[in-house]
C-alpha cells in the first residue's frame, strides 16, 4: 500500500471522465469483486452491494451536527459529496455478532469442538474516506497483532479492495485535519480518487490497484487537474471548524481524572453506547455461549460491546465502572490518552460520527476543549 502524497504526480495519475465511473465498477465486478458502494438506507448512507456498475447514487450530501444527520441534495450533483455515513469499514471486517467456535456432542457423548470461520468473498468498497482508512489501520494493529492474530478479522481483511475518495466537502462534525487523518487519503488504499467537476483523478496505492488502473487505460491527468485536486483537499481541510487541541493528549487528560467536567458529561450522557457503535476504531466485544435447545450443541458468540454498558465493567463480583461518569471517562481517556501506550497514537481519527449520532448532542471536541482549557482546570 502507498504512503506517497496522493494526487501529486501527473505521470502516475489517470483521469477517469465522470461518465465512465461505471467502467471502474464493471472492471472490479469482472475481476470477481462483490462491489459495495454508498446506498441510502433509513435516511443514511451505508455501504451495500451494488446491483450494477452504474448503481452508484449521485447528488447526495449528508448534513451533520451534534445529534443530527440528514441527507440533502448536492447542488453540483457529485457522486461523493456526502462526508460519511454512520458506519465505516468496521462492520465489514469485525462483525457485530458472529460465532467463533461451536461444540457438539458426538454419538459416544463426547464433546467435539470446531472453529467456525467466516466465508469471506472478495469485496471492493467504493467511497472509503481517509478517516476510514486510518481507522482500519488502527483495527489492523489490534486484530492482526503478531501473536494474537484474529482469524475472523484476517480472513475478511485480506479480501478487501479499497477505493478511497478525497473528501471535498467535510461534514460540520468532521475534524480529521486536526488528527492528521484526512481529508485526502494518504495510505492504505488500493485506488484513490479525487472528484472534479468533469471526472476523477485516479491513483493506485497497491499492486492490485495498479492492475485495475492499467486495465482502464486512462489518459494521464493533466498538471491543472492535479493542482485542482490538491487545492480541493487543502480547502476541505481549511473548512473544518472542529478540532482537537493536539495529537497526543495523554498527559493532559490523565492529569485531569478528577475534573468537574466529567460530572457535567455524566449528567447528560444516556450511556446508550451509540458513540462506540459508530466509532470506526472501537473494538470492545463480549463473548457468550448460546446452547441449542436440544442440548446437543452450543455456539460461542462474539458481539460488539461498549464501555458504556454496565456489564462491560463487571469483574468477578463487582463493577469497576458502576456510574456513567466513570464509563464516559474510560471511553474518552482510552480513546485519546492510553491508546498511545497501546498503539502509538490516539484512537480517534476525527470522523465526527460520535458527535452526529449522540442523542444527547455531546460533542467530543467540545468536551476535550473544556477538559484541557487552562482556565477551567480544577
Ligand atoms: S456520549 Fe452520547 S452516544 Fe455516547 S453513550 Fe453517552 S449519550 Fe450515548
Ligand atoms: S472518537 Fe468519535 S470522532 Fe474519533 S474516531 Fe471515534 S467516532 Fe470518530
Image (spheres, rainbow, N blue to C red):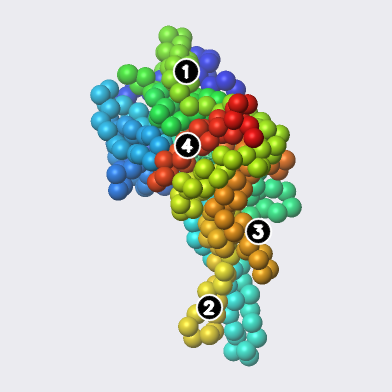
Q: Dividing the image into 4 quarters, which one contains the C terminus?
A: top right
Residue nearer the viewer, 351 or 117 = 351
10 Å crowding of disc 1: few (<14), some (14-19), many (20+): few
Mark toward the start of the polypeptide (3 vs 4): 3
Mark toward the start of the polypeptide (1 vs 2): 1
| Residue 286 image-quadrant placement | bottom right
Residue nearer the viewer, 362 or 235 = 362
Which structural element holds mark 1? helix
Mark 1 beta carbon near ligand 2 (under 8 Å): no
10 Å crowding of disc 2: few (<14), some (14-19), many (20+): some
Which structural element holds mark 4? loop
- Tell me which residue sits at (49%, 53%) in the image: 271
Residue nearer the viewer, 373 or 65 = 373
Q: CA distance from mark 1 to mark 2?
A: 54 Å
Residue nearer the viewer, 163 or 318 = 318
- Tell me which residue sits at (33%, 43%) in the image: 44
- Tell me which residue sits at (62%, 39%) in the image: 259
Residue lying farthest top?
A: 224
User: According to the image, label 2 marks what residue?
Assistant: 291
User: According to the image, label 1 marks what residue?
Assistant: 238
Q: Nearer the viewer, mark 3 or mark 1?
A: 3
Mark toward the start of the polypeptide (4 vs 1): 1
- Tell me which residue sits at (40%, 46%) in the image: 359
Task: State the mark number for residue 363.
Answer: 4
Amino acid at each position: 500500500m502507498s504512503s506517497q502524497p496522493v494526487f501529486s504526480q501527473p505521470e502516475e495519475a489517470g483521469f477517469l471522465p465522470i461518465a465512465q465511473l461505471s467502467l471502474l465498477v464493471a472492471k472490479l465486478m469482472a475481476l470477481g469483486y462483490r462491489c459495495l458502494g454508498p446506498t441510502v438506507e433509513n435516511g443514511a448512507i451505508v455501504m451495500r452491494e451494488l446491483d450494477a456498475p452504474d448503481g452508484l447514487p449521485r447528488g447526495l450530501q449528508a448534513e451533520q451536527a451534534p445529534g443530527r444527520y440528514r441527507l440533502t441534495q448536492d447542488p453540483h450533483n457529485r457522486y461523493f459529496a456526502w462526508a460519511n455515513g454512520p458506519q465505516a469499514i468496521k462492520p465489514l471486517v469485525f462483525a457485530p455478532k458472529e460465532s467463533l467456535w461451536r461444540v457438539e456432542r458426538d454419538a459416544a457423548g463426547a464433546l467435539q469442538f470446531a472453529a467456525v470461520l467466516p466465508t469471506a468473498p472478495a469485496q471492493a468498497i467504493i467511497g472509503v474516506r481517509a478517516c476510514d482508512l486510518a481507522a482500519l489501520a488502527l483495527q489492523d494493529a489490534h486484530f492482526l497483532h503478531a501473536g494474537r492474530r484474529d482469524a475472523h478479522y484476517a480472513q475478511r481483511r485480506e479480501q478487501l479492495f479499497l477505493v478511497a475518495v478525497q473528501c471535498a466537502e467535510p461534514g460540520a462534525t468532521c475534524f480529521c485535519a486536526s488528527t492528521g487523518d484526512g481529508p485526502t487519503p494518504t495510505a492504505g488504499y488500493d485506488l484513490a480518487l479525487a472528484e472534479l467537476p468533469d471526472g476523477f483523478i485516479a491513483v493506485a496505492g497497491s499492486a492490485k490497484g495498479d492492475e485495475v488502473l492499467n486495465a482502464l487505460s486512462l489518459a494521464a491527468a493533466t498538471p491543472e487537474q492535479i493542482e485542482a485536486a490538491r487545492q480541493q483537499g487543502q480547502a476541505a481541510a481549511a473548512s473544518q471548524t472542529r478540532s482537537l487541541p493536539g495529537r497526543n493528549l495523554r498527559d493532559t487528560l490523565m492529569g485531569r481524572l478528577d475534573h468537574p467536567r466529567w460530572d457535567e458529561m455524566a449528567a447528560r450522557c444516556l450511556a446508550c453506547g451509540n458513540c462506540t457503535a459508530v466509532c470506526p476504531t472501537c473494538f470492545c466485544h463480549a463473548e457468550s455461549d448460546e446452547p441449542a435447545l436440544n442440548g446437543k450443541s452450543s455456539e460461542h458468540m462474539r458481539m460488539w460491546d461498549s464501555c458504556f454498558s454496565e456489564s462491560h465493567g463487571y469483574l468477578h463480583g463487582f463493577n469497576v465502572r458502576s456510574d456513567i461518569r466513570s464509563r464516559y471517562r474510560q471511553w474518552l481517556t482510552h480513546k485519546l490518552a492510553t491508546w498511545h501506550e497501546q498503539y502509538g497514537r490516539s484512537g480517534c481519527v476525527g470522523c465526527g460520527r460520535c458527535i452526529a449520532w449522540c442523542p444527547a448532542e455531546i460533542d467530543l471536541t467540545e468536551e476535550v476543549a473544556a477538559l484541557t482549557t487552562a482556565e477551567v482546570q480544577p
